Image (spheres, rainbow, N blue to C red):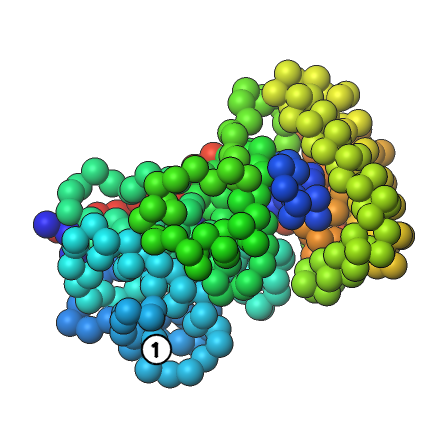
Amino acid sequence: MPPSRLTLRVPGKLLIAGEYAVLEPHQPAVVTAVDRFMTATVTMARENRVTLPALGLRDVGWTAGADGVTFDQDDPRLKFVGEALGAAIAHVRDQFLLPLPFHLTLESELDGADGRKFGLGSSAAAVVATVAATLVLLRDDDTGAPEPETIFKLAAIAHLRAQGSGSGADVAASTFGGWLRYSSFQPEWLGERLRTMPLERLLREPWPFFSVERLSPLPRDLRLCVGWTGQPASTAALVQQVRMLRERDPAAYGAFLAESQTAVEHLVAGLTSANRGRALAALERNRRALATLGERAGVVIETPALAALHHWAEVCGGGGKPSGAGGGDCGVALIFGDDKLEGLQAAWRKAGLEPLPLGVSDAGVTVTRLEW
């Protein structure tokens, strides 16, 4: 018998290294889950409803049909949740289970109380939380959350359908948690499979480009520091410009990919062997590769604020760089030990950067409450 009510949460994400390159086949990135969460609460109900308090959407009715989910009001902000519900319910039906009606509520800590976007992967977290909550609610046993890989694949499918692109690194962080070495499933490959292959077969078969590996052990004194620049960035516009460089100057783009891959692999090796010097050198190598990429593509990846973030992290004995597409949003720094954290945060504030109180979430999808 399914539970009458459940609550689960999934973490947000930050990319540590491998930005832009991770969009290409077999290119690795390091991504980590952060300890701000998207919480999903689902309750058995007489009618299907969804509530998204942060968007001012309450008790929106929805229907699951053969072509996916439709809502009783037309709002583009429902697209990600709609695709997630549609993918999860299609899977439930393929398991010969009855998708009973329920009310889904999503509450987010991933954006600021004033609506600021920090680039913590809120749309991916909403998709993962919706998929996981739906599967847990409508399963036919009490074993807890489904296999993480099933959640990831369904969420990746839903996110791709909603957004049309993306590496899926944010989906992986929200699903698996912790520090991850990640390679993308490749949207073109997945899109083609979705057109030609039944969903259940696609979920069962290996995805040849996708890989995810939890990084362990890590140095006990490793600290992730996050600084907000105060400048929201347009990831789509930046990626488009970089893609134009790939067509215009494939040699320069290929050199960037080679440099990024080397930097990421050295970062992984440095972290997992507790070779702090190697890890920081690799982080700096990736920062320089991204800066060169921006220069050749004609876009600003490392803004003056992100350059200041890097400078003060280095002064304090660590390393820092943009996180994600750059151009604003957040930057990340790695520091070993607690003795210089306060000094780094003070220097960032003086430079106009806002230190965010973020740590790493070792857990991905976590069921926090079940009621029958």
Give the image quarter of residue 251.
top right
Mark 1: which secondary structure?
A: strand
Q: Quadrant of residue 181?
A: top right
Image height of 337 relative to 91, above or below: above
- Please provide percent x and percent y for residue 76: 48, 76
From where the camera sits, is residue 369 visible?
Answer: yes
Most extreme residue toward the bottom, as rendered?
73
Taking the spot 16% from the left edge, 54% from the top edge, the residue there is 97
Q: Position of residue 296 (x, y in %)?
A: 89, 52
In this view, the residue in front, 149 or 193, is 193
**Residue that label 1 marks:** 71
Residue 369 spot, x, y in % from top left: 26, 47
Farthest residue toward the front? 196
Q: Is residue 224 left or right of residue 150?
A: right
Q: Residue at x 62, y 57 (%)?
A: 118
Position in image of residue 28 (x %, y %): 64, 36
In the image, 36 versus 137, the foreground residue is: 137
1 lies above or below 117: above
Three-letter residue code for mark 1 = Phe
Q: Is residue 60 left or right of residue 276?
A: left
Quarter location, residue 257:
top right
**Residue displayed at 19% across by 67% down:** 101
